[in-house]
């Protein structure tokens, strides 16, 4: 590991342009858009993001072809904040395969979403109010996300981390005149802040414990420096740091118990949900834990915690998704669930599989959200699957692409989700003597539920008798929306093949896991990749077996959804009728929000009232008491100054007499 | 020529507003436009001089002629005897002594920059007694600038107290409905504390008189450092309490803060801006400049207490801010919370903490000043600041929405904006206070302070975003016959208002993205002028009982042990310039006073 100055950047000199191009576009559109570009405001951002994508391809390619893996390089741009006279926290980039993968994913999805938004943010051909603001925020988000994944130290990571949170806040509250949107935005920011509290303390702990071990001139928060030194820390220190950092990941990636903000985040426009709350921003937690593999690898406790929280979140969110009717909410819960999968992978030592799943998930989840967005666009803002149905004839392109996305997420063989999900389940089974099978079992069950609720949604929205709300003129979306959908559908099919390689005797006779994707990222993730690395035949055999099992599980879930929601709709309706309380519980997300409100928010609010009352009554009352003393004294003393000359004369005489007597006695 | 300019530049900065006062005093009270322009001109001229002072401070001073922040030294100094003659034995030594170092120069520039903006912002809101209003604002500016320049304790105190008078009238005449009560509460409360401070100052001067080698009633801050640090712990304790009384009320430190919300609510916009941005900093500056270096043993001993109050204030102010129904009160309580961060960082006694405290003083000045300006903008249009009467203003005030959200984000410490720099460094300082990471010996605080204070960062987001949501978002709600578009106002911000807020936003962004010039000019000064007086003492640091108030043992536990990080402390130690020592000929100076030339503090200007 080494640290270099910017002048040694070589081919990678384009790296700063990756975040800067969207930022410049964003500023341009944000400041002048309302005056000049208006309905064409998507162009600057489109160009900016396209440039970022080109830069990402160059960077990732350079890393792939040129950079030896031993050099996980840190490039210093400038000094940012100096905690002492010698040390400073720098703005530095770390460029390695993991960064490359993340950059490619982020920029590719962003570009498609920008294209999609051009039509999505128009109604009947007219730009929506705040059109230029939307694209300015989009550009800002791409900047923030690229900064996050390019960051070479924890402080710049924190900047990107908070900045994407800000963009999420701004985007969820895009329709700020809707109180629900404004509340959801604030909630998202605050819940993330709770996680960031832990994250920030983790960074402080790293500084406190790592910097005595390093040279004075090193930035003690550089990844390279920290990861080189983390082995010298005591185990409890590693565990503390890892758990604190994981707090941040829990908030950003919406894991239990901080998942409450993500279902409400669907208040934002559909492209935003696709980009920020499904494909990229929410995966920042996964990225961060993967990046901090050397820290987590030092602490089995933290790894176990990551895996358990991931598994529990995955199953719980999948259960809740069963009882939702809002398409975007179903997708939001499924995002939570899929992120849980990724954390299971990280926890059980399959970081490469987790990142692989992050990458495939980005395609199919963005596809599903954008598909839901075009349904919503066609339905005039309606998202409730009870209000419409049987849309497959009127929205054929949307239906076809949505189906592909759904199949990929459900884990249908030969689509991208199948390969990555299966790796994670397999890794979970091999993790630990008794915890491993439990996690693996939970993951398999989650896969079953995923297939079921995904196709429940597909069948409810697109199959059955055609039902369309009154007064809605259903039209297939315009070209700007169709093209990204089709491209993402292609991605959802083929993206997975980056992670497999042709292996004779593998799944279906031809496919074996751990392809070139894994080869590419493994050098970075090796500290936390214990499962995937050993491609020994014995394990390999079990892996193929599990692939068949999960394929059957996926098809089983789809079949069950088909029976319940296409063939025998009455059965499906009978379930909530039979257990109304349980259904209500699941539908209302187990009342986590209400508990939060009662346990955290209201007591704090009461504490605030108490503080204010203390100010007004206790402290000011005490001050009033102090002022009372002179007032009472004055009340008596002022009698002496009544203004009558006789009184003054008497006082003076008495006083003189007293002085005289004292003087005489003293002598 | 340059030298002359450098010697007198600070005097110019202080007295240009007073020239403005005279100018306005000569004007016809009815020529409103002229008065406004005159006041604006005077304050902008002051800003020009202050920036010139900054430029002069940043002169090439090192051997290679490279630009260089004068490593922690005082510069641009001028000393003119004022009262008494220091040459006489048993004389009185009060001087008009001014000078700036890396600590005060930025506060000076911030003050000079905010006053014109506050004056400009008052153009539409103040419609009566215009002449007196701008006159008082300029007087206030002169007082505030004087505090940051003063190098003589009596001069400092005169300026410090002088700021009360214009502010008292500004609140009492142009304030809200309860302005009389607010003005008198403010005046009496702050004066009561300041009187104790004054007693302490006189006592210190008396100690200087008693001290062998000085023998005069000196108010020279440099000399009083050496006097104060040689007092025994019991005396230092009493002095600490007495001096802190005045400054703690001004900061305001919990639980002395109750005057602040009332005064902010009642004060006119410019008054609120300057009160929050500068006047509160006078208290914090007093702690930084006077109390900590002058009474080091007591500072270490009281640090956990003061930091504890600061942390309580952070949470308390934040919680109280959250339940306010009035925007201005909310921002006022947020000041209590933010000043808590300043005090916490200061008493961590680490380079990071002190830098953070000072940076946060600047940052809070910028963002809270801007927030008060925005509240004023809303109040001028809607004649209310209550959340239950207005809402959804983003709908037809997009510029306002942008600025309010921007400065809220700056206030809650979003990385990339200015607030983060200060808060983060404060937390780093408090978190590492008991370590030796900055090359100094261990400081007084444990990590718990930082952990609790970090929770305050969450709460700051809670109340600021709550305010944004109530004011900006949701369906549009406004009272009938509003917005008021009289006297040149428009529904959204006028170009004048945008021109006022934009420089603040640019500064906030610049500090957030590239705070290096700020930090690297502050740190040597903080190291030399503050930390060097307190930490890094030898274990047997003698505390000579000059006047034993109590039978305190001469050695005390508060003095830190020699906690140097032996491995690399030599690399981390900055070049000790020791130029602040002016007491070379002093007899019986403790072992530590490794003194340089006796006039080294006065490095003058342009060299």
Image (cartoon, rainbow, N blue to C red):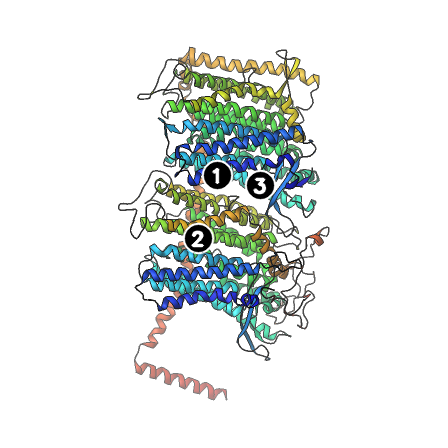
Which secondary structure, mark 2? helix
Subunit bearing disc 1: A
Q: Is residue B188 visible?
A: no
Q: Quadrant of residue A423?
A: top right
Q: Are marks 2 and 1 on the same chain?
A: no
Given residues A47 and A142, the one toward you in this image is A47
Q: Is residue A293 visible?
A: yes
Q: Are marks 3 and 2 on the same chain?
A: no
Which secondary structure, mark 3? helix
Query: Residue B149: horizontal and vertical position, in percent?
Result: 52, 64
- Most extreme residue toward the right, as rendered? B567
What whole-number distance in Å separates the C-alpha atoms at marks 2 and 1?
23 Å
Say which quadrant the N terminus of chain A sits in: top right
What whole-number distance in Å separates the C-alpha atoms at marks 1 and 3?
15 Å
Give the mark nearest the N terminus, 1 or 3. Answer: 3
Q: Are marks 1 and 3 on the same chain?
A: yes
- Most extreme residue toward the left, as rendered? B481
**Residue found at x 35% / y 69%:** B26
Residue B73, disc:
none
The residue singled out by tag 1 in the image is A166
Mark 2 crowdedness (10 Å alpha carbons): few <14, some 14-19, many ≥20 = many
The residue singled out by tag 3 in the image is A156
Does residue B526 appear to the left or right of B35 in the view shown? right
Query: Residue B330: horizontal and vertical position, in percent?
Result: 41, 49
The residue singled out by tag 2 in the image is B369
Residue B446 in the image: above or below residue A6: below
- Most extreme residue toward the front, as rendered? B1
Query: Residue A419: horizontal and vertical position, in percent?
Result: 59, 19
């Amino acid at each position: 590991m080494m640290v270099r100055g910017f002048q040694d950047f070589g081919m990678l000199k384009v790296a700063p342009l990756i975040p800067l191009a969207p930022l410049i576009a964003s500023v341009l559109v944000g400041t002048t858009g309302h005056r000049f570009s208006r309905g064409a405001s998507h162009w600057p951002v489109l160009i900016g993001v396209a440039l970022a994508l080109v830069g990402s391809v160059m960077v990732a390619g350079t890393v792939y072809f040129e950079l030896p893996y031993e050099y996980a390089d840190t490039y210093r741009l400038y000094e940012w904040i100096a905690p002492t006279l010698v040390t400073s926290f720098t703005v530095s980039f770390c460029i390695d395969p993991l960064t490359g993968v993340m950059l490619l994913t982020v920029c590719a999805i962003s570009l498609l979403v920008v294209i999609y938004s051009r039509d999505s943010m128009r109604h009947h051909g007219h730009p929506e109010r705040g059109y230029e603001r939307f694209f300015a925020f989009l550009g800002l988000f791409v900047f923030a996300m690229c900064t996050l994944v390019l960051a070479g130290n924890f402080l710049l990571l924190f900047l990107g981390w908070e900045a994407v949170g800000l963009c999420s806040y701004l985007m969820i509250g895009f329709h700020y005149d809707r109180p629900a949107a404004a509340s959801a935005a604030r909630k998202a920011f605050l819940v993330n802040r709770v996680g960031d509290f832990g994250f920030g303390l983790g960074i402080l702990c790293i500084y406190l414990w790592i910097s005595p071990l390093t040279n004075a001139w090193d930035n003690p928060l550089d990844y390279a420096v920290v990861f080189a030194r983390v082995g010298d820390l005591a185990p409890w220190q590693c565990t503390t740091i890892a758990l604190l950092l994981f707090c941040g990941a829990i908030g950003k990636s919406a894991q239990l118990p901080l998942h409450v903000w993500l279902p409400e985040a669907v208040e934002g426009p559909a492209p935003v949900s696709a980009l920020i709350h499904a494909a990229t921003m929410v995966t920042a937690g996964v990225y961060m834990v993967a990046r901090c593999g050397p820290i987590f690898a030092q602490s089995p406790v933290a790894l176990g915690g990551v895996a358990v929280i991931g598994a529990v979140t995955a199953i719980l969110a999948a259960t809740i998704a069963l009882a939702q009717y809002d398409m975007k909410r179903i997708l939001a819960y499924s995002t939570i669930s899929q992120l849980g999968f990724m954390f299971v992978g990280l926890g059980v030592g399959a970081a490469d599989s987790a990142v692989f799943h992050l990458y495939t998930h980005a395609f199919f989840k963005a596809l599903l959200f954008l598909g839901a967005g075009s349904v919503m666009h066609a339905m005039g803002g309606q998202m409730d699957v009870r209000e419409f149905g049987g849309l497959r004839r009127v929205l054929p392109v949307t239906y076809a692409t949505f189906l592909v996305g759904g199949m990929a997420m459900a884990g249908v063989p030969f689509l991208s989700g199948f390969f990555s999900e299966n790796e994670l389940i397999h890794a979970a089974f091999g993790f630990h003597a008794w915890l491993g099978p439990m996690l693996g079992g939970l993951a398999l069950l989650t896969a079953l539920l995923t297939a079921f609720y995904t196709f429940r949604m597909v069948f409810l929205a697109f199959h059955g008798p055609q039902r369309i709300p009154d007064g809605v003129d259903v039209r297939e979306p315009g070209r700007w929306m169709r093209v990204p959908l089709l491209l993402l559908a292609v991605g959802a099919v083929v993206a997975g093949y980056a992670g497999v390689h042709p292996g004779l005797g593998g799944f279906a006779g031809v496919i074996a896991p751990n392809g070139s994707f894994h080869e590419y990222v493994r050098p970075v993730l090796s500290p936390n990749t214990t499962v995937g690395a050993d491609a020994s035949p014995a394990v390999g055999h079990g892996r193929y077996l599990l692939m068949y099992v999960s394929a059957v599980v996926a098809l089983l879930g789809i079949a069950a959804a088909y029976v319940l929601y296409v063939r025998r709709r009455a059965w499906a309706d009978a379930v909530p009728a039979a257990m109304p309380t349980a259904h209500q519980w699941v539908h209302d997300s187990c009342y986590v929000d209400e508990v939060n409100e009662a346990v955290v928010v209201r007591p704090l609010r009461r504490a605030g009232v108490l503080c204010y009352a203390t100010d007004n009554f206790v402290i000011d009352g005490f001050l009033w008491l102090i002022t009372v003393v002179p007032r009472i004294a004055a009340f008596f003393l002022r009698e002496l100054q009544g203004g009558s000359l006789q009184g003054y004369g008497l006082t003076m005489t008495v006083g003189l007499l007293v002085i005289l007597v004292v003087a005489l006695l003293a002598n | 020529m340059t030298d002359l300019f450098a010697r007198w530049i600070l005097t110019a900065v202080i007295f240009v507003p007073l020239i403005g006062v005279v100018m306005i005093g000569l004007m016809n009270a009815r020529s409103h436009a002229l008065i406004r322009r005159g006041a604006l001109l005077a304050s902008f001229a002051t800003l020009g001089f202050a920036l010139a002072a900054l430029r002069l401070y940043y002169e090439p001073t090192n051997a290679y002629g490279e630009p260089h922040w004068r490593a922690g030294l005082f510069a641009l100094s001028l000393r003119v005897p004022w009262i008494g003659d220091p040459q006489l034995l048993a004389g009185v030594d009060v001087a008009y002594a001014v000078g700036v170092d890396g600590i005060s120069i930025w506060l000076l520039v911030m003050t000079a920059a905010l006053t014109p903006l506050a004056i400009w912002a008052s153009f539409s809101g103040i419609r009566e007694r215009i002449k007196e209003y701008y006159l008082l604002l300029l007087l206030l500016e002169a007082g505030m600038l004087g505090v940051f320049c003063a190098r003589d304790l009596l001069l400092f105190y005169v300026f410090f107290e002088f700021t009360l008078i214009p502010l008292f009238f500004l609140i009492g005449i142009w304030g809200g409905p309860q302005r009389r009560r607010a003005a008198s509460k403010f005046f009496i409360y702050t004066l009561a504390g300041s009187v104790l401070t004054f007693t302490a100052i006189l006592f210190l001067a008396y100690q200087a008189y008693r001290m062998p080698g000085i023998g005069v009633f000196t108010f020279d801050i440099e000399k009083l450092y050496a006097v104060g640090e040689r007092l025994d712990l019991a005396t230092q304790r009493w002095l600490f309490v007495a001096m802190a009384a005045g400054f703690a009320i001004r900061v305001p430190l919990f639980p002395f803060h109750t005057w602040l919300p009332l005064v902010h609510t009642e004060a006119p916009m410019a008054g609120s801006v300057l009160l929050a941005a500068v006047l509160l900093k006078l208290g914090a500056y007093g702690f930084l400049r006077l109390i900590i270096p002058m009474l080091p043993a007591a500072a270490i001993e009281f640090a956990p207490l003061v930091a504890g109050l600061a942390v309580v204030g952070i949470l308390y102010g934040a919680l109280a801010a959250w339940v306010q129904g009035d925007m201005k009160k909310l921002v006022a309580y947020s000041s209590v919370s933010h000043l808590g961060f300043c005090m916490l960082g200061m008493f961590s006694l680490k380079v990071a903490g002190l830098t953070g405290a000072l940076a946060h003083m600047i940052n809070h000045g910028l963002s809270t000043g801007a927030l008060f300006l925005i509240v004023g903008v809303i109040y001028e249009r809607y004649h209310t600041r209550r959340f239950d009467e207005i809402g959804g203003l983003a709908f037809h005030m997009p510029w306002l929405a942008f600025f309010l959200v921007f400065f809220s984000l700056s206030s809650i410490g979003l990385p990339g904006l200015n607030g983060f720099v200060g808060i983060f460094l404060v937390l780093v300082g408090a978190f590492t206070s008991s370590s030796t990471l900055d090359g100094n010996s261990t400081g007084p605080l444990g990590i718990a302070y930082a952990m609790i204070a970090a929770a305050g960062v969450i709460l700051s987001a809670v109340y600021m975003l709550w305010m944004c949501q109530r004011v900006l978002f949701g369906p549009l709600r406004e009272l009938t016959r509003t917005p008021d578009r009289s006297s040149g106002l428009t529904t959204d911000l006028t170009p004048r208002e945008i021109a006022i807020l934009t420089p603040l936003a640019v500064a906030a962004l610049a500090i957030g993205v590239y705070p290096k010039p700020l930090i690297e000019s502050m740190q040597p000064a903080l190291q030399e002028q503050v930390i060097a007086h307190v930490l890094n003492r030898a274990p047997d640091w003698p505390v000579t009982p000059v006047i034993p108030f109590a039978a305190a043992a001469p050695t005390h536990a508060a003095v830190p042990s020699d906690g140097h990080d032996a491995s690399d402390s030599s690399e981390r130690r900055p070049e000790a310039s020791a130029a602040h020592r002016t007491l070379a000929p002093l007899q019986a100076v403790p072992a530590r006073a490794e003194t340089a030339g006796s006039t080294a503090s006065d490095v003058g200007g342009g060299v």
